[in-house]
Amino acid sequence: MRATTQASSPAEVKHGTVAATRGEPVSPIRPSPRHTDRQGPGNHDPYDLLIIGTGPAGLVAAREAVAAGAWVALIESRHIGGNCLNEGCIPSKTMLRSAQLIAEMRNAPSYGVTAPAEISVDFAAVMARMRRVRERILRVDSPARLGDEGIDLHVGHARFVGADAVAVDGTRLRFRKALIATGSRPLLPDIEGLAAAGYLNNETVFALTTLPPSLLVIGGGPLGCELA
Ligand SMILES: Cc1cc2nc3c(=O)[nH]c(=O)nc-3n(C[C@H](O)[C@H](O)[C@H](O)COP(=O)(O)OP(=O)(O)OC[C@H]3O[C@@H](n4cnc5c(N)ncnc54)[C@H](O)[C@@H]3O)c2cc1C
């Protein structure tokens, strides 16, 4: 998959999954001969694979490509771990674990176990645990760890400046193949009065430290049901 200037359009970067092609057949990455004497991370010109986004897609792709012997650049503009670690799967599943524990304690008698007389929830402690879990997982994907694995992490907003080059805050990185793994961001739905009323989304709700007295969840899909 070869990125072209077409892939640099904001829409494709925003919604992107894989770099656009110019009708070329998709070919595997062919690591260049220098990988046989890999010395460790550093700047390479060109990179065999340049990946935009450190969510699950970008991280897995980077590790697989390094394992195949490729020189890999990984670019992130916000948080390492992407949506999943910071504002998605991990915080939501960590909170769900606390909710599950409460449900099990309440349901203890059906297992022949005496339920505690009083079950109380310390919301701030639930959220503090969520942040600890996030930090623990982040250690596995820390910049130092990625560097040790041979992945060059570049922090900044990536934009295409040519068919074989990306600029990251003033640094130009050339590549042979590019992967756009930029995931998604929440969109403000077209609901009259919502913006004025104020709202939380997945980028803000997991930063709460006090339990709101009430919460209206709009949207009954998997994420809305989880949150409710
Ligand atoms: C509340 C919630 C719960 C979820 N629970 C689950 C679950 O249980 N299981 C599951 O499988 N999925 C779950 N998901 C979905 C999951 O989070 C996403 O599918 C997953 O994060 C997508 O991964 P990704 O690598 O494609 O993109 P992302 O994780 O979105 O990562 C993309 C990264 O690219 C970066 N980026 C974007 N543009 C640029 C640029 N121009 N330059 C540099 N960096 C850039 C972004 O900052 C971001 O870090 C959940 C989502 C939410 C919101």
Image: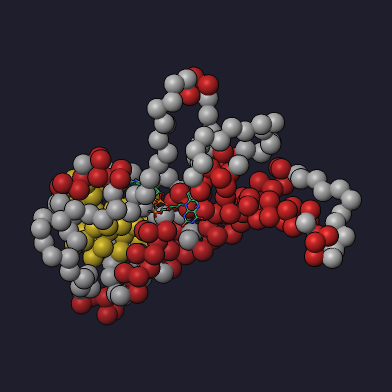
Task: Give the residue displayed 69% in from the left and 36% down from the top.
Answer: 211
In the figure, residue 68 lies in which quadrant? bottom left
Say which residue appears at 86% left-offset and 48% top-offset: 118
Vertical arrangement, residue 24 with respect to residue 103, above or below: below
Instruction: Tell me the residue at 56%/45% (across/down).
Output: 225
- Residue 5 location (% of width, % of height): 15, 47
- Residue 43 shown left or right of residue 134 in the figure: left
Q: Viewer-proximal residue, 198 or 64?
A: 198
What is the residue that sits farthest to the bottom in this orientation? 36
Relative image position of residue 103 (x, y in whole percent): 73, 53
Q: Is residue 132 visible?
A: no
Foreground pick, 32 / 188: 188
Which residue, as the protein is rendered here, is positioned at the far left? 23
Residue depicted at x 43% and y 68%: 148
For the C terminus, give its image quadrant. top right
Near-viewer residue (111 or 147)? 111
Query: Image height check: is 200 above or below 116?
Result: above
Q: Residue 2, can we see it?
A: yes
Q: Position of residue 140 (x, y in %)?
A: 51, 64
Q: Residue furthest front?
A: 110
The image shows residue 96 at horizontal and vertical percentages of 63, 52
For the N terminus, give its image quadrant: bottom left
